[in-house]
Structure formats: C-alpha cells, structure tokens
Amino acid sequence: MPDELPRKLPPKRTVDHEIELVPGTKPPARAPYRMSQPELVELRKQLKEMLESGIIKPAKSPYGAPVLFQKKADGSLRMCCDYRALNKITVKNKYPIPTGSGLLRPSKRAKYFTKIDLRSGYWQVRIKEGDERRRQLSRGMELSSFLSCLSA
C-alpha cells in the first residue's frame, strides 16, 4: 500500500455519500475530548496532511464531532471522529444485505476478479456537496469539514 494519502479528492461521480437527517433534527455540536500533549502534536500533524491533501477544509459552523486516537498494532495513532451522536439522527437505509450467493450470481461467467486494497479507503468517497457541514470535527477553537468520508 502507498505510504501517502491521496493527493486530491476523488472525482465527482453520479452518486456521492449523502447524510440524510431525520426530519426536525439538526447535526449535533459536541465539545472536543481532552488530549495528551503527544496526541495534540499528532492531531496537528494529521490535520495538516489532510488539509494539504484537500481531504478537509477549514470551516465555521455550530456543529462538530470530537476526535480521539486509537493506538494501532505498529504503535502509531489512528485518528477517529466520534460520530455516534450524528449516527443517531441519520436516516438508516432500509434495504437488506445480499447473501453471498446473491452477490456472486451476476458474476458467475466472469474470468477475472480484482482485489483493491486502498490506504484509508474511507477518505476516497466524496461527501455530497452541502453535507460537509454535517461531518465536521471539533478540535478546540477550530473546526474542519471533511470533504470525503471518514469513519462513516
């Protein structure tokens, strides 16, 4: 896998990730979690990389989700946004998950199958224009909007 983040947002497609809220609700505003000094340094580093890559942009909004870190097996820190409050007021998709045979049936005559392993693949799905404000992270006095999916 590449060591670097994608250098730009994915292209606009027919369908982008949409965040539909339950009617009458608004995105939550949560205070940031406390962080240790090493976590703050890592947060600034990761946000700088994402800003330079175009994955996030500076934002002003009354909404926001707190950020926390999870230690990976290699000792590095994975940034996570706590979108639980947003998930509670998001309209859930009401279609069943297909069975394995249902997924394979359309491809029964295929000769080749590909396996794609993307680094931070959830950053490679564009958020629908206008929904970015619902995917903001709060980090003290500043906010950033994700332009692609993160911890969706």
Image (cartoon, grey):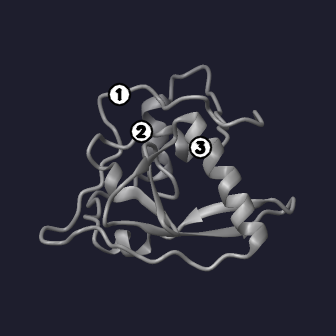
Instruction: Say whether residue 30 is left or right of residue 53.
Output: left
**Image disc number at residue 126:** 2
Label 3: state its secondary structure.
helix
Judge whether 111 appears above or below 70 on screen. Answer: above
Cα separation, mark 2 vs mark 1, equals 8 Å
Dot 2 alpha-carbon crowd within 10 angstroms: few under 14, some 14 to 19, many 20 or more: many
In percent of width and height, residue 69 lies at: 67, 68
User: In which quarter of the view is residue 2 placed?
Assistant: top right
In percent of width and height, residue 67 lies at: 56, 68
Label 2: state its secondary structure.
loop
Dot 1 alpha-carbon crowd within 10 angstroms: few under 14, some 14 to 19, many 20 or more: few
In percent of width and height, residue 141 lies at: 48, 66
Q: Mark 2: which amino acid?
A: Arg
The residue pinned by badge 3 equals 50
Dot 3 alpha-carbon crowd within 10 angstroms: few under 14, some 14 to 19, many 20 or more: some
User: In which quarter of the view is residue 19 placed?
Assistant: bottom left
Cα separation, mark 2 vs mark 3, equals 14 Å
Q: Nearer the viewer, residue 75 or 29?
A: 29
Q: Mark 1: which amino acid?
A: Arg
At a point 42% along the width and 45% down the height, the residue shown is: 102
The residue pinned by badge 1 equals 13
Q: Nearer the viewer, residue 111 or 117?
A: 117
In percent of width and height, residue 23 lies at: 13, 67
Earlier in the chain: of badge 1 and badge 3, it is 1
Q: Mark 3: which amino acid?
A: Met
Tag 2 and tag 1, C-beta contact below 8 Å: yes
At a point 29% along the width and 29% down the height, the residue shown is: 14
At a point 37% along the width and 69% down the height, the residue shown is: 87
Tag 2 and tag 3, C-beta contact below 8 Å: no
Label 1: state its secondary structure.
loop
